[in-house]
Image (cartoon, rainbow, N blue to C red):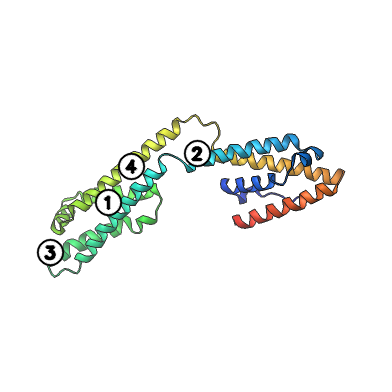
Amino acid sequence: MINEIKRSYFNPTQTLTLVSRCMSLLTPELSESLGLTTVAAKCSDNMNVLDASLSRTQKSEYTHKLKELDNKCDDAFKMIKALTKAYRYSHIAEEREAANLLYDVMHEHIQNVQELGYVRQMAKLKALDSELSKDKYKAAIARLSIDVYVSYLISCRNDFEQLYIEKNIAEADKKESVQTSDAASMAIESLMALTSIINANLLIAPTPEAQELATNLNSVIEAVSRASK
């Protein structure tokens, strides 16, 4: 008998791996002899829909541009943080005071900002922009002569936010009939339907071919399940 497929174990990419590996075990002759032709065709169709959906997500025209802008924001922030940290050891008291003021506000608002997702990262940078527009911080920035780096960070953040909004609008406007999560559900449901028919064959009229197929399918299911944990 084929073991139960625990669908909650698999994300869409892992679902595609599972279904494609299972389908690779089925030959047309074996499908016909076990009465699997129709459900196997449906399973194959759903697998192709999932594959196409994942490809669209991975190849979004905005993905590369957003990554570039995100890297620019990260680099600008690292530059400001490094300069500010260095000025904390200045022999000039006014520079130390300005550096400590800026360092504290950056630490407060965006500690470990590079580790956050896009939305949270940009929200925190926007909050920092608002703080830095206050007179005491503007004076500190001018004192350390890092205006150009702060302006560049704000510009990168604004460009990223605008492109992210454009991406969301464009994706909302697409006439995609099947989302990736839905495609994954349909693919794994059709695979479960296929394994149910095979199990029924094993109960009613077991054959060496069906038993061998069940053994091989169990090996695939176990391997992919183990890798997904």
Q: Judge from the rendering whether residue 73 lies leftward or rightward of residue 191; answer left or right.
A: left
Q: CA distance from mark 4 to mark 2?
A: 22 Å
Mark 3 or 4, closer to the camera:
4
Which residue is at the front of the view, 74 or 48?
Answer: 48
Q: Secondary structure at mark 3?
A: helix
Task: Give coordinates of residue 140: x percent, y percent.
Answer: 16, 57
Residue indicated by mark 1: 128
Earlier along the polypeptide chain: callout 3 or callout 4? 3
Q: CA distance from mark 2 to mark 1?
A: 34 Å
Task: Give coordinates of residue 11: x percent, y percent.
Answer: 57, 48
Q: CA distance from mark 4 to mark 1?
A: 14 Å
Indicate the amino acid at tag 1.
Leu
- Picture disc at residue 161: 4
Indicate the amino acid at tag 2.
Arg
Residue indicated by mark 3: 94
Task: Give coordinates of residue 180: x percent, y percent.
Answer: 54, 40
Indicate the amino acid at tag 3.
Glu
- Picture disc at residue 56: 2
Q: Quadrant of residue 160?
A: top left
Q: CA distance from mark 3 to mark 4?
A: 35 Å
Q: Judge from the rendering whether residue 126 lies leftward or rightward of residue 100; answer left or right.
A: right
